[in-house]
Amino acid sequence: MTLPRKALHAALLSAFPSRAKLAQMVQHGLGENLNEIAAESLDLQATVFALLDWAEAEGRVQELLEAAFNESPGNPDLTALLSKSTPPDLRAGPDARRRSDSIRQNITESQQSAAIRFPWVLGATNVYGYLLATWCPAYLDPRLTTHKVYGARHYPNAWLIVPTSVLVFVGTWLIHRRRESYEIWWRSTLPLFLGAAATVPILAPEVPHPWLTAVTLEWLMITIVWLWVRYSLLRQHDTKTGKISLSRKEFISRLFLVAFCIPLALLLPAVSYMKNAARETVTDPGELDILNRAAVILVGSQVIFWCCGPVLELFRAWKDADR
C-alpha cells in the first residue's frame, strides 16, 4: 500500500511543530542531517515537503514513518497511518521490515482506543474539579449562618455554574482532541482556569472566594503533573528501540515511589489543617460538622485524582518498561 503523501505531510507537521524537533527525529531515526535534505531557509511546511521528496527518491518513506512514530508514539495521525500501511518493499531492506513488524505489534486496538478516550476522561476530570471548587461553596455557604465574617451567603446566580461546567467539558475535549495537543498539553488546563475565573463574581462578596481559589489551583496542579508525565516525561524514549532507556527506567521507578508516597504523607496533615480552619470560620457544631465532611470529600477526591492520574501513568510506564 502506497502511503498517502498529503496525510503523511499533515501527520509530520502535527507531530513535529518545529524544525528542531523534526531535525532530531531525522537524525535519531534515519541517521541523516535535515539541513542536507532541506535548506535552513525553508519554513516548516516546505521542509517537510522536501523531506518527503527525499524519502521517496531514496525509497525510505516507510522508514521515515516508523522513525516519526518512534519519536512521537502518542500522535494519532502517525498511529493511524502506520496501522494501515503494509510492510515496506524490498528497497527498504530486511532491517526496516523487522522494525516495521516490531512497531506494528505495539499498535494495539487498546492503545488506539485509549488515545481516543483520553480527551473525554480529561474533560470529565476538569468538570469534576470545577464543580468541586464552585458547587461546594454554593451549597455550603447558605447553611453557614454562624460564619464569623459574612454569615450565611446566598448566590442567586449560582445556576450559572451548571452551563459553565458544560463549557469546561466541551472546551477541554475540543482542545485536547486537536492533533497538536500532546505537544502543547498545557492548553487543556485553560477551560478549567477560565471557568473558575468566570465564577469569581458569582460567589461575591468573597472575591475571590478562598475555597474556589484553593481547590482550583490544587486541581490544576495535579492535572499539569498528570499531563506532563503523560506527554513529556514518558515520551523521552530510545528512538531506535522504542523503549525507555535504563537510566530513565530507574528514574521513573523512583519517581513512581515518590508520587505514591506524597498523598500518604500529606493526607492527615491536609485534613487536620482544614478542620482547624473550619473551627476558625464557624461556631455552630452542626455547621462545623458540615465543613469537616466537605474537607474529607475534597481531600479524598484529590488523593483519588492524584493516584488515578500521574501515579497510575507512572505505574504503567514502570510496568511496561521491560516489555
Image (cartoon, rainbow, N blue to C red):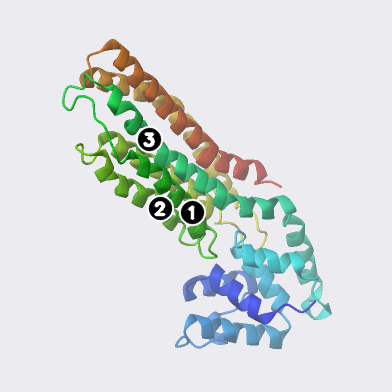
Q: Earlier in the sequence, mark 2 or mark 3?
A: 3
Q: Which of the 4 quarters of the picture holds residue 15?
A: bottom right
Mark 2 crowdedness (10 Å alpha carbons): few <14, some 14-19, many ≥20: many
- Report the disc number at residue 135: 3
Q: Earlier in the sequence, mark 1 or mark 3?
A: 3
Residue 106 picture location, percent across and down? 73, 55
Query: In this rendering, would 206 be left or right of 63?
Result: left
- Report the disc number at residue 170: 1
Q: Nearer the viewer, residue 114 or 263?
A: 114
Mark 3: amino acid: Trp
Mark 1: amino acid: Val
The structure residue drawn at horizontal position 62% and vertical position 69%, both measured from the top left corner, is: 68
The furthest residue to the top: 285
Nearer the observer, disc 1 or disc 2? 1
Tell whether label 3 touches label 1 (CB within 8 Å): no
Question: Can you say which quadrant of the picture contains the N terminus?
Answer: bottom right
Please tell me whether residue 260 is drawn above or below residue 127 in the rendered image.
above
Mark 2: amino acid: Pro
Query: In this rendering, would 149 be left or right of 159?
Result: left
| Residue of label 2 | 191
Q: Give the SS element for disc 1.
A: helix
The structure residue drawn at horizontal position 53% and vertical position 73%, both measured from the top left corner, is: 22
Tally of numbered tags: 3
